[in-house]
Each structure stands twice: as structure tokens, then as C-alpha cells.
Image: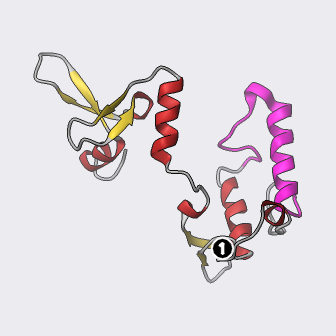
């Protein structure tokens, strides 16, 4: 993996078959911003160009330029990469800031003690009082649900 500047990242070429018809990451991000601007409240972050795998087009470009560590399958498509290389910030801090900024609670999980915010609750456990339960962190939720959060 090489160390490159932000300007160099923007100049990385995209695959020819990307959904935004962009030549570089810069062009891709410009098209994404145009789509956000044009669609406003109707913008779909899941499918901005009609494809739910749109982020992988960026990951493939970054991996192809060796800006992130990755492997490709026999057909030249991205097989595996390290997502932590794309986001240098500890996600827990991002979740905590979000929870605090939006009035959500930030508590330790009753099962493992790991802190989490109310916006992350996907499961709960009984508290011992009739009809009440307490939320648990996403990791404990996934363990209880066979790997699914």
C-alpha cells in the first residue's frame, strides 16, 4: 500500500464500466455530488446511480492504484480489502459523537460493558421487571442472532 495525497487519490482512474461514467475518482465524486444536489430529499444513498454496490466502484479504483490493500478475483473484480484503511477514525468515537449531538443515550451494554448509543440498538434483554427490557450493543445482538445484527 502506498502513501498518496488527497489530490493524487482524486486523480486515480476509475474502471471503464462504472455507473457514473467517470474517468477518475474526482469525476465520480462530482457526479455523486450532482446527484445529491439534483435529487435533494429524494436522494438514495443506497443507489445513487441505480446500483447498490456503488461504493465498491470507488474501492476497486483505490485498490487498483494500490492506495488500499486488496485482492481481486480471477475476473478482476474486488474480492477483499481492509475497510479500516478507508476510514482512519475509530467508529466508536463517531457513534458517540452522533449519539451525544442528537440527544441519544450512550451507555454500557448490560451483557459485555461495551458502550453504545441508542441509535445502534437492534436487540434487547429483559431487565427483571415485568414488561421491561434494556437495549444491548450491536455485537451482542449479532451474537444472539447468529451473526446478524
Please say whether residue 33 is one of the residues in the magenta stretch.
yes
Residue at image coords 49%, 50%:
90
The image's colour scheme reads secondary structure
Name the spot of residue 64 as percent of width and height, x first. Answer: 72, 75
Up-down relation of residue 113 to residue 98 (above or below): below
Label 1 Cα neighbours within 10 Å, binned few <14 / some 14-19 / many ≥20: few
Report x, y in % for residue 42.
Answer: 74, 28
Q: Residue at x 66, y 80 (%)?
A: 75
Indicate the quadrant where residue 10 lies. Answer: bottom right
Residue 67: which quarter of the image? bottom right
Instruction: Please tell me which residue lies in front, 21 or 3.
Output: 3
Residue 143 visible in rendering: yes
Residue 94 falls left or right of residue 21? left
Residue 55 is drawn in which quadrant? bottom right
Magenta residues (range): 21-50
The reply to whether residue 20 is visible in this rendering is: no
Q: Is 6 located above or below residue 48 in the figure?
A: below
Q: Left or right? Give the position of 54 relative to 96.
A: right
Quarter the N terminus occupies: bottom right
The residue drawn where x is 65% and y is 50% is 52
Compare residues 51 and 9 and report the one nearer the observer.
9
Question: Mark 1 = which residue?
Answer: 77
Amino acid at each position: 500500500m502506498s502513501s498518496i495525497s488527497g489530490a493524487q487519490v482524486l486523480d486515480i482512474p476509475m474502471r471503464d464500466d462504472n455507473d457514473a461514467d467517470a474517468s477518475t475518482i474526482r469525476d465520480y465524486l462530482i457526479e455523486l455530488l450532482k446527484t445529491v444536489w439534483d435529487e435533494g430529499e429524494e436522494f438514495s444513498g443506497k443507489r445513487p446511480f441505480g446500483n447498490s454496490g456503488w461504493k465498491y466502484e470507488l474501492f476497486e479504483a483505490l485498490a487498483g492504484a494500490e492506495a488500499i490493500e486488496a485482492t481481486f478475483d480471477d475476473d478482476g473484480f474486488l474480492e477483499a480489502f481492509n475497510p479500516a484503511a478507508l476510514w482512519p477514525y475509530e467508529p466508536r468515537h463517531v457513534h458517540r459523537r452522533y449519539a451525544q449531538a442528537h440527544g441519544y443515550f450512550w451507555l454500557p451494554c448490560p451483557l459485555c460493558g461495551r458502550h453504545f448509543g441508542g441509535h445502534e440498538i437492534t436487540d434487547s434483554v429483559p431487565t427483571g421487571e415485568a414488561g421491561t427490557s434494556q437495549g444491548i450493543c450491536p455485537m451482542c445482538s449479532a451474537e444472539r442472532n447468529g451473526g446478524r445484527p
